[in-house]
Image: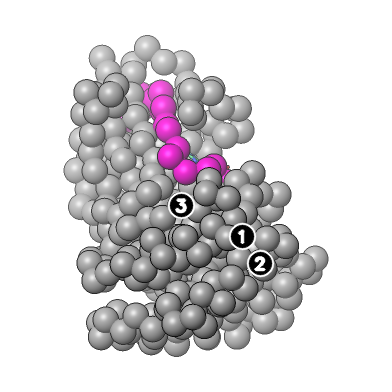
Amino acid sequence: MSKVGITRAHTNIALIKYWGKRNNELFLPMNSSLSLTLDAFYTETKVTLDDSLDRDYFILDNQEQSLEETQKITKFLNLFRKETQLTTYARVESHNHVPTAAGLASSASAFAALAGAMNQATGLNLSHQELSTYARRGSGSATRSIFGGFVEWTMGYGDDSASSYAIPVDPADWNIGMLVIAVNKQKKKVSSRIGMKRTVETSPFYPAWVESAKTDLVDLKQAIHARDFIRLGEITESNGMKMHGTMLGAVPPISYWEPDSVKAIQKVKDIRDMGIPCYVTMDAGPNVKVLCRQSDMATIHKLLLNDFKADQLISSTVGSGITNLTEADWLR
Ligand code: ADP
Ligand code: DP6
Ligand code: CO
C-alpha cells in the first residue's frame, strides 16, 4: 500500500526579516516578519508513504542524501505521523528550482512543499493557516511560503505553537517585482540557523534589532495598504541593513557579504539616483535582491548588465501559494 502527495511551493524574500528564535525546538520567532513570495524560484516535492520501506529516504535533485540530511526530514515527517498516528516510512523526492543553501531561501520553499505533500499524502487536510505552523517547524521562513503575495508570519505568544502562523496580507498585484543579483550560488558556510542563534546569544545590538523590527513591520504594512512603493522600499532596505548590522555585533562576528555584494548595492543606489525607485535587501548569503516596480524590471536589468553577467541576473514577478500537483505534472 502506498499513498502519494506532490506539492510545489515558491520561495519568499523577507522585507521585514526573521533573525532569531525565542524557542529553538518549536521555531517560534523573536519578532513577526513579512515577505514577498517569488514566482521564479520554487521547490517541487513528492512524498510516497510506502509500507514496504524500512526507513525514510530523501532524494534531492536525483541524489540520495546523507543520513544526517535524512534525519532532518524524518524529524519533520514525525510531526505529521504523530498527528495522524501513521507509522509508515516515506520516500521524499525533491527538486529545487533555486540554488540550495545559498541565501536564496531554499529552506522556505523546501519545507512549505514538504508540508503540503505530507498534508496530501496523509489525508490530514489541514487549512493553510494550520499547515503554515507545520512548515514553520522545518524552517521558520517556510511558514510564509504557504501563501502568495505579501505574507506576514505573526510571532504568536509564549510557547504556544498554534499562535505563530502565516497570514496573507496583500496579493502584491500592484506592479511589484524583484530582481536577484546572484553574486555567489555556492552553499554558505554558516547556515541561517546557526547564524541567528549566535546573533541572539552574543550580539549586544539584538534587543534594539527586535524593537526596531516591530516598528518597521507596522510602518511597512501601512505602506502596503497605501500602495506607497517608495515607503515600502525605504523600510525594506533599512530593515535588511539593520539585520546585517546586528549580525556584525555577534561574537565571533557574522557577515555574509562579499565584495560583489557591495558593488551590487552601489549600482542599485546609482540606478535610484537616476530616478528609478529600487531598493536592496539581503539574506543569509552574499546575493542581493532588488525590490522594484515590475514595469521597471527590464530597464534595471539592462543597466545592471554593465556590471554583471546575464546569468547572474534573475527577474521575478510575484509568486502564488502552494499548489498540489498530479503524477502527470511530476513526470512532465
Ligand atoms: P537557504 O538560504 O537556501 O534557505 P538555509 O541554510 O536556510 O539556506 O537552508 C538550507 C537547508 O535547507 C539545506 O542544507 C537542506 O537541509 C534544506 N533543504 C534545502 N532544499 C531542500 C529540499 N528541497 N527538501 C528538503 N530540505 C531542503
Ligand atoms: C535571513 O528560515 O532559513 O532569510 O528557521 O533556522 O531554518 P531556520 O532559518 P531560515 O532563516 C531565514 C533568515 C532570513 C530572513 C527571513 O527569511 O526572514
Ligand atoms: Co533558509
CA distance separating discs 1 and 2: 9 Å
| Range of residues picked out in magenta | 84-101
Mark 2 belongs to which amino acid? Lys
Disc 3 + disc 2, Cβ < 8 Å: no
Which residue in the protein does label 3 denote? Answer: 314
The quadrant of the rendering that contains the N terminus is top left
Q: Nearer the viewer, residue 174 or 210?
A: 174
Q: Residue at x 24, y 28 (%)?
A: 329
The answer as to whether callout 1 falls within 8 Å of ligand 1 is no
Which residue in the protein does label 1 denote? Answer: 307
The label nearer to you, 1 versus 2, is 1
The label nearer to you, 1 versus 3, is 1
For the rendered model, the colour scheme is one colour
Q: Is residue 174 visible?
A: yes
Which residue in the protein does label 2 denote? Answer: 263
Position of 150 relative to 24 (above/below):
below
